Amino acid sequence: MPVSAWFLLAIAGWFVALSGMVLHSRRLAEMRRGDVSVDTQGWCIARGIITAVPPGLAPRTGCTGQVLFGVVAPDRVWFLRQQAGGGFHILGPFLGVLRLRDDMAAYEVRAGLGAVAMLVGMAIFLLSAIVLAAGGAGWLTASGGAMVGAIAIQVRSERRRAPMVAAEVVRALHTMNEQTLLSTDGFVSDEAGHVAALVRSRYAPYFHRLAALNRVLTTAQYRIEARPDSAQQLTCSVLFVRALAHCQATLLLLERGMRPSARALLRCALEAVFNLGACASDHKVALAFVDSHHVDRRQLGKKLTQLSSPDTKAQFQTDFDDIMRAINEEIAAVGASERRTRSMAKAAGLEDVYLLHYSLLSGPIHSTVGDLDRQFRTNPTTGHLELLTEPEIENLNDELELLSAVMAGLAAPMDKVFHLGLEGICDAHHAAIIDLNRSDG
């Protein structure tokens, strides 16, 4: 064969090897996706094990039957794909495929396309270089040989790692089998935790802002210095702590797709904001709020007298009349009166919020028919009415924005009473979330 042909063959070998290196690099980049929360196809990913989207959500991802889950070996991420012909193929970063039988009793290693291309290309180049460089270009042969040797060492290393990776996959499969499912354990299942990862990824900008807002308010708790003799400061501090805890619990419910429960708890948080704003507006309102406790006790006493069960009623008869007499005397002494939610919202300057958002959030509290109607949907294919039992993860934007409004609403009254300097930064985070919701349309 002429020298020119050998020369062209050497160039072709280098081209094949280079293509293999590029393919290999792209595969490595794909394998390193295990560091993110959810990949581009919507599969939930966590360090250690990459789990699939819960069954109820999988049909909407368009990825059913693709990557089942993945395993993070010591310094690799391996994606597991179940094959139609049985067994599992593990897509590795270099060798490409490590195949496990269905019973996990045996495995085999296959070279990946990138590795094959690199080996073949370098072999062609080496053969050509030996012919062309028999005289004075031995360095070409040496460099080609060194590269082939390095690839061979890497392949041997990957093959030696195969049993360890296979063991990791088996352990991961057992872990997956032990996890509780939404279909058997509902929202307290392990699978619901994967929903949280999906929601956090889908609404990442919102959660980023809410996390920052929450951090500002949480750290502010430890800067409150309430005087023991100040009813206003004591009341405002405890209302702030209670409302913030409700907001944090609302966020936990939203990320698990428990929208009705989250809306109910958000109403509780909003009522605490009304009381906080009213108490912060005037120390006399704070005193009246504390005194209204006696009215609450009297109303509870009246309800106890209406109990129909003699046995239950008898539990409260001891000194009952004396207790009610003492409560009435306290009410008369301090001039206590009932504090209604709307009056507290008005005193806080939030009556419109009461009339709109508070009223709309009452549905899940009272299980009204209008709110229960959200628990049904019409199947677009069959036209049948279906009861919704799976997590709700679509269109959570409005709830997340309202949550940020409630959290930001804690800042102004606390600044008025304790001068914490919260309002500006909290309003900035809330404004950013409003912009996010508007841009999402």
Image: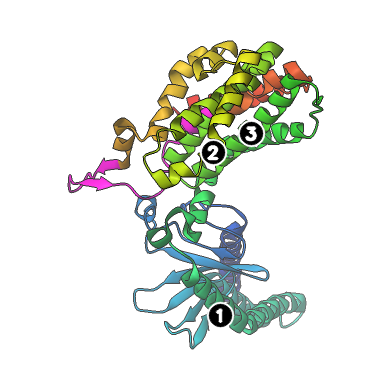
Distance between the Cα atoms at labels 3 and 1?
A: 50 Å
Question: Is residue 56 found left or right of 164 in the rendered image?
Answer: left
Residue ID at (48%, 18%): 354
Check whether the beta carbons of the residues at disc 2 and disc 3 lie within 8 A of each other.
no
Numbered label attached to residue 3: none
| Residue picked out by circle 1 | 166
- Circles 3 and 1: CB distance less than 8 Å? no
Is residue 152 in view?
yes
Q: Residue tagged by mark 3?
A: 242
The amino acid pointed to by label 3 is Arg
Which numbered disc, 1 or 2, marks the residue closer to the eye? 2
Q: Is residue 395 left or right of residue 350?
A: left
In the depicted view, which residue is nearer to us: 58 or 218?
A: 218
Which stretch did the figure color magenta?
A: 376-403
Sequence-first disc among 2 and 3: 3
Q: Secondary structure at mark 3?
A: helix
N-terminal label among 3 and 1: 1
Give the left or right position of residue 258, taking residue 269 as reference.
left
Q: Residue at x 58, y 76 (%)?
A: 168
Left or right of 353: which side holds 65? left
User: Is 359 placed above or below 96 here?
Assistant: above
In the picture, the quarter occupied by the C terminus is top left
Q: How far separated are the C-alphas under marks 1 and 2?
A: 41 Å
Q: Could you say where residue 261 lies in the image, as x and y percent from the top left?
A: 45, 40
Disc 2: which residue: 250
Identify the residue at horizontal 65%, vertical 22% (top origin): 290
> Is residue 397 in the magenta section?
yes
Alpha-carbon span between mark 2 and mark 3: 12 Å
